[in-house]
Image (spheres, coloured by chain):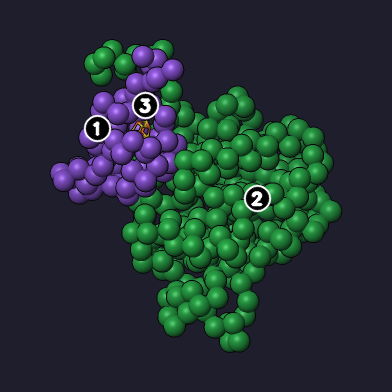
Chain colours: A purple, B green
Amino acid sequence: MAFKGTLLINTERCKGCGVCTTGCPNNCIALSKNVNKKGYNYMELINEDDCIGCANCAVICPDAIIEVYRTKI
Amino acid sequence: MTREEIIKPENLVYKKTSVLTDNVMHYCPGCGHGLTHRLIAEVIDEMGIQDKTIGVAPVGCAVLAYNYFDVDCIEAAHGRAPALGTAIKRLYPEHFVFTYQGDGDLAAIGTAETIHACNRGENFTMIFVNNGIYGMTGGQMAPTTLKDMKTSTSPYGRDLQTMGNPLKITELIAQLPGALYVTRQAVYTPALARKCKKAIRQAFENQKLKQGISFIEIVSNCNSGWKLSPIQANEWLEQNMLPFYPLGDLKNNK
Ligand SMILES: Cc1ncc(C[n+]2csc(CCOP(=O)(O)OP(=O)(O)O)c2C)c(N)n1
Ligand code: SF4
Ligand code: SF4
Ligand code: SF4
Ligand SMILES: [Mg+2]
């Protein structure tokens, strides 16, 4: 069974720590070149097609800013 | 399939728990304190015990923990969280009580309170975030600082001859008859964070048994004090902290 996922990221609360990027099995996320109002390079979903909604990124985010959605395809 | 088709309530698999307030945590980027708070809040949420939980905050970087947990909390004097935990649990035996402390708080100034609460077998949950350093005050050496580890008060590394040995307080606690469940966890990968959450759940469930203390050490990072990026700090943790502080249950008498 295959899954397709996507994220809702509260980028204004992201601290740009990058730890979420180390846990993604499909390298879907990366820190943006742009910064949020606090000056942090926020996390972005760069590879939407490969996100399987495993929630690894959300489970490792210390600031609880990622919402994950997943559906069967 | 478009993004809009996926983002529907029935497809939600992860969302911030409402047991965490909406306040932005003051912790440095990537700090294990934030992650540990999140896991505790998720356990409280899943057990449906928000209105029956009382937390005790420490002195250390987590001094403002009560701003982030939407449960009743009290702030302890430095190191005295287990004494307050004892009082609260004895007055409210049907409530769920947890203390939250760093290594300077729990294993330096508060060693007596820690040991005696565990030895008496008080029926609450102790969360111990060990980053091997006094994070809040500027990265000074703690009892838990590793051999040769550089801190602001051991700039050439911890020399065992003059500065003594690092203290494995969790191993000491596991010896005590009042300790029901003693485990060492970490939270720097998704798999470890999920495992740690299960341990926190057991530690809270254990309070129903009234058979002693449940003690969880979380080997954590302090990227500011260690002077590393958040990702480098987690790598350093794995390579240096874990060989001396190995993960796993030290005691599980349930
Ligand atoms: C009685 C007293 N002594 C010393 C201090 C200074 N002080 C504040 S936090 C702290 C240690 C914090 O280290 P730790 O418990 O490891 O917490 P961390 O910040 O690393 O999470 C110290 C010594 C104090 N606030 N009160
Ligand atoms: S949900 Fe899983 S696959 Fe999608 S971005 Fe997060 S870690 Fe990557
Ligand atoms: S873990 Fe959270 S705070 Fe850190 S970069 Fe990822 S989304 Fe941002
Ligand atoms: S100083 Fe260290 S322990 Fe304190 S918030 Fe920053 S990284 Fe976390
Ligand atoms: Mg510390």
Numbered tag placed on residue B74 in the rendering: none
Amino acid under disc 1: Asn
Q: Chain of mark 2?
A: B
**For mark 1, does the 10 Å Cα neighbourhood hold few (<14), some (14 to 19), or many (20 or more) residues?**
few
Residue A38 shows in this picture: no
Mark 3–mark 2 distance (CA, rounded to whole Å): 30 Å
Per the model, the C-alpha gap separating discs 3 and 1 is: 11 Å
Residue that badge 3 annotates: A52
Compare marks 3 and 1 and give the one earlier in the sequence.
Answer: 1
Task: Where is residue A3? Give x, y as percent.
Answer: 38, 20
Check the picture and name the quadrant holding the C terminus of chain B: top right
Q: Label 1: which residue?
A: A47
Q: Are marks 3 and 1 in contact (CB under 8 Å)?
A: no
Q: Chain of mark 3?
A: A
Q: Cβ of disc 1 within 8 Å of ligand 2?
A: yes
Q: Nearer the viewer, mark 3 or mark 2?
A: 3
* Nearest to viewer (mark 1 / mark 2): 1
Q: Could you tell me which residue is drawn at 36 percent across and 66 percent down?
A: B227
What residue is shown at x 31% (from left), y 17% (from top)? B7
Residue that carries the numbered disc 2 in the rendered image: B248
Q: Which amino acid type is marked by label 3?
A: Ile
- Compared across the picture, whether B218 is left or right of A56 comes to right
Which residue type does callout 2 highlight?
Answer: Gly
- Label 1 lies in what chain? A
Secondary structure at numbered mark 1: loop
Identify the residue shown where x is 63% and y is 76%: B165
